[in-house]
């Protein structure tokens, strides 16, 4: 029977799966397939699994349950295998690699850090105060100068300065937070965000990270939305 595969753990993981059911319209109990020192956490499925809300939640619940008791190598949503034998063979074919990754993730969780500009007013006021050229253009426009090129010139100047300052802030935030991590990844931000940072944080640094979060939030100033999420399964650091 086809299987949905959630994650890989070591054979010694407590693996408390009692009462946990998996993905699909008719969810089956979550169980394990063992090969040597490794186990794959799976459930039987009889349909193609789509990223529906209920299934995304079920997938995440399995990862979080496993995380409470030990290290887990989480697979991205949607990974399936034809049967138990295929899973066993996949584990056996890369035992050393999986064990190495599990060792690297031991005692860690993933945290995401994102930042966006929620209110442009304080930043724009600061730019006009700091840049005489921008201030002069703004005063000419407010004073009634009808030169059609002025708004465009001011807009381009301000946009360039906003981007530069956000990039500087992004670098500063990253440098302040990566000392709490074992590994980190900086990804291209999306939407209104200017920072998209993932941290692999050891257990002993989690409180320090939370303290840094609170301190940075106080110091960062108005108009910035700094968002932390975690602890999360370390999807970003599975290789």
Image (spheres, rainbow, N blue to C red):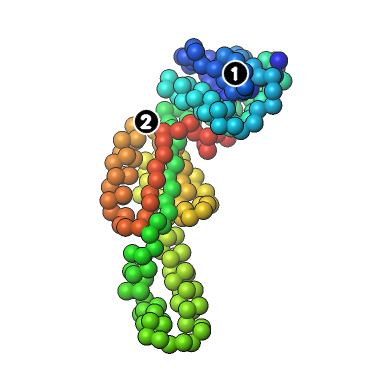
Residue 221: image x %, image y %? Answer: 30, 57
Q: Which quadrant does the N terminus fall into?
A: top right
Residue plotted at (46% across, 21% down): 65
User: How many tags in the picture?
Assistant: 2
- The residue lying furthest to the top in this view is 18
Depth check: give the residue in front, 110 or 62.
Answer: 62
The residue carrying mark 2 is 203
Given residues 121 and 112, the one toward you in this image is 121
Residue at left 32%, top 55%?
Answer: 220
Q: Label 1, secondary structure: give it.
A: loop
In the picture, which quadrant includes the C terminus?
Answer: top right
Q: Position of residue 233 (x, y in %)?
A: 48, 31
Left or right, 83 with respect to 197, comes to right
Near-viewer residue (234 or 121) = 121
N-terminal of the pair, mark 1 or mark 2, is 1
Q: Is residue 84 left or right of residue 134?
A: right
The reply to whether residue 62 is visible in this rendering is: yes
Left or right side of 69 for 58? right
In this view, 100 is above or below 193 = above
For label 1, the residue is 27
Residue located at (47% from left, 21% from top) = 66
Q: Is residue 168 above or below residue 23?
A: below
Point out residue 45 in the picture as x, y percentages from the top left corner: 66, 19
Mark 1 or mark 2: which is in front? 1
Q: CA distance from mark 1 to mark 2?
A: 33 Å
Residue 22, horizontal then vertical, whole percent: 57, 20
Badge 2 element:
helix
In this rendering, is residue 173 above or below 101? below
Circle 1 Cα neighbour tier, 10 Å, few/some/many (<14 / 14–19 / ≥20): some
């Amino acid at each position: 029977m086809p299987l949905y595969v959630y994650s890989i753990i070591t054979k010694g993981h407590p693996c408390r799966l009692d009462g946990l059911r998996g993905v699909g319209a008719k969810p089956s109990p979550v169980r394990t397939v063992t090969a040597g020192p490794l186990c794959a956490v799976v459930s039987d499925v009889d349909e193609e699994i789509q990223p529906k809300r209920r299934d995304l939640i079920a997938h995440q619940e399995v990862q979080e349950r496993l995380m409470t008791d030990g290290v887990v190598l989480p697979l991205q949503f949607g990974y399936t295998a034809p049967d138990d034998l295929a899973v066993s063979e996949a584990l056996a074919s890369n035992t050393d690699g999986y064990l190495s990754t599990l060792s690297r993730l031991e005692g860690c969780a993933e945290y995401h850090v994102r930042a966006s500009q929620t209110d442009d007013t304080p930043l724009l006021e600061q730019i006009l105060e700091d840049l005489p050229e921008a201030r002069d253009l703004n005063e000419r426009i407010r004073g009634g100068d009808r030169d059609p090129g002025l708004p465009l010139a001011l807009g381009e100047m301000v946009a360039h300065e906003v981007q530069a300052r956000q990039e500087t802030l992004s670098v500063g935030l990253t440098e302040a937070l990566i000392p709490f991590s074992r590994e980190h990844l900086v990804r291209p931000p999306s939407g209104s965000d200017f920072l998209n940072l993932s941290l692999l944080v050891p257990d002993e640094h989690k409180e320090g990270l939370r303290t840094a979060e609170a301190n940075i939030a106080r110091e960062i100033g108005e108009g910035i939305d700094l968002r932390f999420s975690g602890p999360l399964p370390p999807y970003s650091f599975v290789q």
